[in-house]
Image (cartoon, helix red, strand yellow):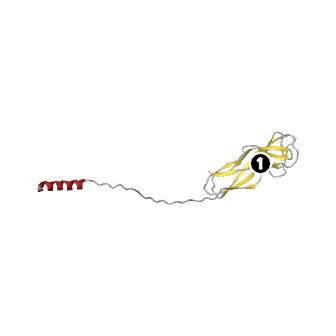
Amino acid sequence: MMKSNCVKILFSLIMLLSINVTVAQNSATATFTASVNIIEPITLTTTRNMHFADIDAQNGGQVILNTDDSRTATGGAILKKSGNATAANLQVKGQKGYSYSVQIPVQNVRITNGSSEIILKDFKTEIDSNTLNQDSQIIKVGATLDMQPGLDPGYYSTSTPIAVVVSYN
């Protein structure tokens, strides 16, 4: 009987040693850091206003002011040499290496002198690059004047400034 008990004990011991005990892990930990790079805010400043200079518009017509300050007249408008025509110049500043988009008016704008008005339309821009390769860049804005015959002589201007918007992409 002792032999049989010894066999049972030996057998039980072998069974205990052969059991693979697995302990499940109930939690784990990881760590991370946080960081941020604050960039320079994008700004836009007018450095020169748009001016079409002197025009004889008694017969109406159109005057196109290009971004290089040159003008073209059609449909009866006559360009006078006095005064300097200038496209609007806007200086955009921001984070070097960042690209941006420009939103110009798509609707017509009225410029007035009392009850007389001229339509300003077809805005266009000239930009060397939409990426700030230096601290600032100039955006040039041109447009077209659409004039009806019989306009009152005088100085015409917008009643409110014309908005141009720049935004980082």
Q: State left or right for residue 117 relative to residue 131.
A: right
The image quadrant of residue 109 is top right
**How would you rate the neighbour count of disc 1 (Cα within 10 Å): few for under 14, some for 14-19, many for 20 or more?**
some
Q: Position of residue 157 (x, y in %)?
A: 82, 49
Q: Secondary structure at mark 1?
A: loop
In-front residue for pair 14/55: 14
| 147 vs 132: above or below | above
Q: Position of residue 32 (x, y in %)?
A: 48, 59
Q: Position of residue 167 (x, y in %)?
A: 65, 51
Q: Looking at the image, which residue sits at the far front?
A: 1
Q: Position of residue 98 (x, y in %)?
A: 61, 54
Amino acid at the residue labelled 1: Ser
In-front residue for pair 22/32: 22
Q: Quadrant of the N terminus?
A: bottom left
Q: State left or right for residue 25 relative to residue 133.
A: left
In-front residue for pair 81/118: 118
In-front residue for pair 101/37: 37
The residue that mark 1 highlights is: 70
* Residue drawn at the location 74% of the way across and 48% of the way down: 142
The image quadrant of residue 12 is bottom left
Q: Is residue 141 visible?
A: yes
* Residue drawn at the location 39% of the way across and 56% of the way down: 26
| 92 vs 108: above or below | below
